[in-house]
Amino acid sequence: MLILDRYLTREIAKPLIVFCGGLLLLFANFTAIRYLNRVADGLMPFQSVMPLVLVRAAVALEILLPVALHLSVVVTLGRLYTDSEMTAIFGSGVSPARIIRIVFAGSLVVAGLVAFLSIYVRPWANANRYRLEREAVADVDLNDMQPGHFYENSSGTVLFFQQRDPNSGRMHKVFIQSRSEDRVRLIWAEEAYYPEPTEAGASRTLVCSSALTYELSRDRGVVRQARSDELILEWEKAKVLLEEYRRKAAPTWQLARSVLSKDIAEFQWRLSTPIAALLMGLLGFPLSRAKPRQGKYAKLFVSVVSYATFYNLNMMARTWVEKGVVGTVPGIWWVHLLLGILVAGLLWRRTTHP
């Protein structure tokens, strides 16, 4: 690698690390705040927060790396333009095509990393995320629930209560709703409490006092009413954590064989992220061109807007494929095709009009 190649690669890598680290930190903080709010509401235990933040951050890297690369190329080359270093480089006989090759090589490395993240890490991290969220719901202690909130367990049963006795911990004015295929059951109880399980792995129950039960038949519209002095409900089957199919957690090879439109959209998304990283890295070169008197970050706003536009178009194309509005071909690829044409046109102009 020549001196110029090493110099430009090093200068681009520095802000890339800073941008990617900063964006990742912001994302992790935002995600942690969301989960901590759920902890404060008693919806999940505190110890589940950090593992969930880590797996969510692993998924976010496939998005954060391309935008960090794009901004790094624009900021680095824009600084070289404003400091007249690019003028000196071109004056010494270096062509714009040489700069493009250096940016292309760096972008190719990042695209390879993004491909690994998207194809292998994304499904692994999402599978762990869903598992942790299921376990977090199952680990919720009913004694930590706060009055005035709606709580839903993994079976879809909803619990609400107005007050809690600070001494006994018992809930007062309790409302419970559960649904099945043929009926809806509503329970109103004056008091309810959560007894400690008698053995490990046993189902967790909720004991209701002075309970009034309504059962509505979905088919016949019949309403049955019953009153109980004490009613024991199964709140959660702690050891039965049902695993339903989630396409974001499905292996890439499995998505490749699927004919479902949502699976195809997810498969194309995973394959498209490294291409997006490569194109956004190359787009940074023409967008970085600045006049000597312009600020070092003069093109930063344009870069952010261009990436946001591309990302929103990509999301829209993915939704269209999921809903069957657009077929497998062109799928979501028309967005990358348009970006590729734009990048090729801008690079051609930069090489012919340096």
Image (cartoon, rainbow, N blue to C red):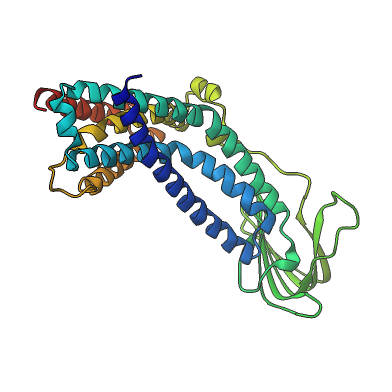
Whole-percent x, y for residue 282 in the image: 27, 29
Closer to the camera in the image, 40 or 343: 343
Compared with 259, 296 (above or below) is below
The answer to which quarter of the image holds residue 4 is top left
Closer to the camera in the image, 86 or 203: 86
Which residue is drawn at the image coordinates 61% and 43% (left, top)? Answer: 130
Which residue is drawn at the image coordinates 57% and 63% (left, top)? Answer: 37
Name the side, left or right, on which 55 lies relative to 25: right
Name the side, left or right, on which 122 lies relative to 307: right
Whole-percent x, y for residue 262 in the image: 46, 33
Compared with 97, 303 (above or below) is below
Question: If the image is split into quadrants, where does the N terminus sit?
Answer: top left
Closer to the camera in the image, 166 or 292: 292
For the question of whether residue 181 can be seen, the reply is no
Whole-percent x, y for residue 343 in the image: 22, 28
Number of marks in the rendered image: 0
Compared with 198, 132 (above or below) is above
The answer to which quarter of the image holds residue 5 is top left
Instruction: Spot the residue most to the right.
Output: 198
Closer to the camera in the image, 354 or 125: 354
The answer to which quarter of the image holds residue 337 is top left
Name the side, left or right, on which 241 lies relative to 275: right
For the question of whether residue 139 can be seen, the reply is yes
Question: If the image is split into quadrants, where does the C terminus sit?
Answer: top left
Whole-percent x, y for residue 19 in the image: 39, 45
Name the side, left or right, on which 271 lies relative to 91: right
Which residue is drawn at the image coordinates 32% and 20% (left, top)? Answer: 2
Instruction: Spot the residue most to the left.
Output: 353
